[in-house]
Image (cartoon, rainbow, N blue to C red):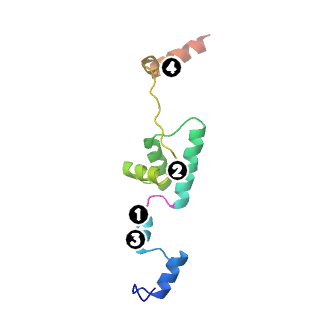
Amino acid sequence: VAKIYRVNRTTLSRRHKGAQPSKVKQAAQDRQNLNLQQEHELVLYIERCTRQGLPPTREMIQNFAATIVKNEVSTAWVSRFLHRHADELPIKWSTGIDRKRHNADSEERYSLYFDLLHSK
């Protein structure tokens, strides 16, 4: 097979064993922001947050990844990450909150509520 495709026999053997990735594959891995272990840990963290009822947003995932690599990651990276891990991290849309709850959700209202609690 090596002769037919004019490939060094040793290179072919190493690639077959998985010991030597192709240059294209290696370049893609080098460009990746997180390595495989870091991505796996991030997936586990996202799953844990989701089980606890706090599924992270795309922006939160972007911040988690940026913290891990100590560098900014793009929104496109988040999309690719979610696509790579689609089986583990199904995307779900949340329902919005009604207007009364939205209007009640303000710092001023929380302060008034806790001031009232402390005064009793």
The disc label shown at residue 110, or none: 4
Q: Pick the residue in front: 19 or 75.
A: 19
Q: Pick the residue in front: 100 or 73.
A: 100
Q: Pick the residue in front: 26 or 60.
A: 26
- SS of the residue at dot 1? helix
How far apart in space, not on screen, are marks 1 and 3 (Cα)?
Answer: 11 Å
Q: Are marks 1 and 3 in contact (CB under 8 Å)?
A: no
> Which residue is pictured at 59% across the width and 14% down the height?
117
Say which residue label 2 marks.
87
Q: Main secondary structure of the magenta part?
A: loop
> Which residue is pictured at 48% across the width and 58% down the height?
34
Which of marks 1 and 4 precedes in the sequence?
A: 1
Q: Give neighbour class at mark 3: few <14, some 14-19, many 20+ (Cα, 10 Å).
A: few
The disc label shown at residue 81, or none: none
Q: Are marks 2 and 4 in contact (CB under 8 Å)?
A: no
How far apart in space, not on screen, are marks 1 and 2 (Cα)?
Answer: 23 Å
> Which residue type carries mark 3?
Val
